Image: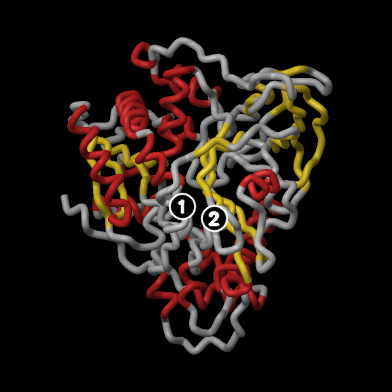
Amino acid sequence: MNFHRSFAHGVHPEGHTEQTEHLPIQRLPFVKRYILPLGQHLGAPAKPTIKIGERVQRGQQIAEAGAFVSTTLHSPVTGWVRAVEPRRHPNGKLQAAIEIEADPYATQRLETKPSIDWKALSSNEFITHVQKAGIVGMGGAAFPSHVKYAVPDGMHIKHLIINGAECEPYLTNDHRLMLERPDTLLQGIEIVRQKIGAEQATIGVELNKADAIALLQKHIKQGNYEHIQVAPLRVKYPQGAEKMLIKSLFDIEIPAGQLPRDVGITVNNVGTIIAIADYFNIGMPLLERIVTVSGPGVEQPANLIVPLGTPVRELLKFCGGLKDTTCEVIMGGPMMGLPIASFDVPILKGSSGILAFTAAETSKPKEYSCIRCGRCLEACPHFLNPSRLARLSKAGWYTDMTQFKAMDCVECGACTFSCPSGIPIVQLIKVGKMEIRKASAASK
């Protein structure tokens, strides 16, 4: 297997990881107030299981899964439930959420539980445990992890892929996890590999993280993990997209409308696997995550352990605040992240980064007419025609967009990045996809 191959197309944005790639992970101090949206994962929102005024303990379940494609929610702190009502979500909308006031006199220590004998669990029991732990994809999509492990009868998962590509510029939380918690990562990989019956596990890591590659290889050898290997990958965006990672590692293309499991593959993020190991080792559900705070507009960049529900302003305050030249703060990476309108919005399960940018990075280029250069076609990893889709969206011809596979677009932004005319291609495609979904829902 050639681990230095890559997928076709894609782009090469500057990395800018030098601000945080060498900074050890540190814990953000607990704050006074936490906002936990019930819909911070793909699928049905969670359903509250607590009442206003009730005292909750750190790690206590406060909302149950609303459906199979849904997951539970746990209190990140010991304190009191102050509200169950709509609060501002990072996407800008008001969504149902649980507000918790932390007890200033509580130690906030998590009471560790005996390790769970995962080997003794049936497949269905394992899936139930992962759902109850509230674990989702930590790379940004926040897809409930247990759903991936529910392999339909007749299907066999041959390969488990661990996504350590972290191809978004500025973000380094997965990089630091691989460096600081390699043994926990390998334990989590082995748990998932055995429970889904995968023959081999492959950790895909881009070559710009050479220290992580070397360290993981060392620990694999020391731990005699004969079914786990590390695959160095070329540096390219969007290498971290599931289908691109599968193409790079195994030269397998996932047909439109199908999932990785249809070709015998399951993909998990580094943070997700470590969360699974923590749950089965010490009984810790998904209460917190690593967030990279970086960008030219922040005073002191950092990689932080952040309790879920923490307002963004608390992270910025801990990092010394924003520079006077800051113009925009986004949640996620610069390619796919979203600008936030308020610093009071909370950190979610899928919040990988908080990035602050100045005018130099956020100034909108002057938009010119499309010159038919084809650079967006060369950039699109899914071989779509982004320029055509953008024009159809701008004209309001949303039905025609479906004929040109608009819904196969993963909104990676490579087209907009490569456009010399400054056309907001991916933004136009997003609008069109939203209208297509609205029309589909209305027809049902």
Q: Closest to the observer: 154 or 270?
A: 270
The amino acid marked with disc number 2 is: Ser
Number of numbered discs visible in the structure rendering: 2
Of mark 1 and mark 2, the one earlier in the sequence is 1
Give the residue at x 30% y 27%: 190
Q: Specify whether residue 207 is in view.
A: yes
Q: Is residue 11 above or below residue 312?
A: below
Task: Using the image, tell me which numbered label, if any, was put on residue 20.
Answer: 1
Cα distance between the residues tagged 1 and 2: 7 Å
The amino acid marked with disc number 1 is: Thr
- Identify the residue under disc 2: 294
Tell me the element at label 1.
Answer: loop
Give the residue at x 50% y 18%: 283
In screen coordinates, is 79 left or right of 170? right
Q: Closest to the observer: 373 or 139?
A: 139
Give the residue at x 42% y 32%: 274
Give the residue at x 65% y 29%: 66
In screen coordinates, is 374 left or right of 215? right
**Residue 204 percent coordinates (x, y):** 30, 47
In screen coordinates, is 83 left or right of 371? right
Q: Closest to the observer: 313 or 352?
A: 313
Tell me, yes or no, whether the two marked residues, 1 and 2, touch with CB atoms within 8 Å.
yes
Tell me the element at label 2.
Answer: strand
Q: Is residue 143 above or below residue 296?
A: above
Q: Is residue 423 above or below residue 151?
A: below
Image coloring type:
secondary structure
Q: Specify whether residue 154 is in view.
A: no
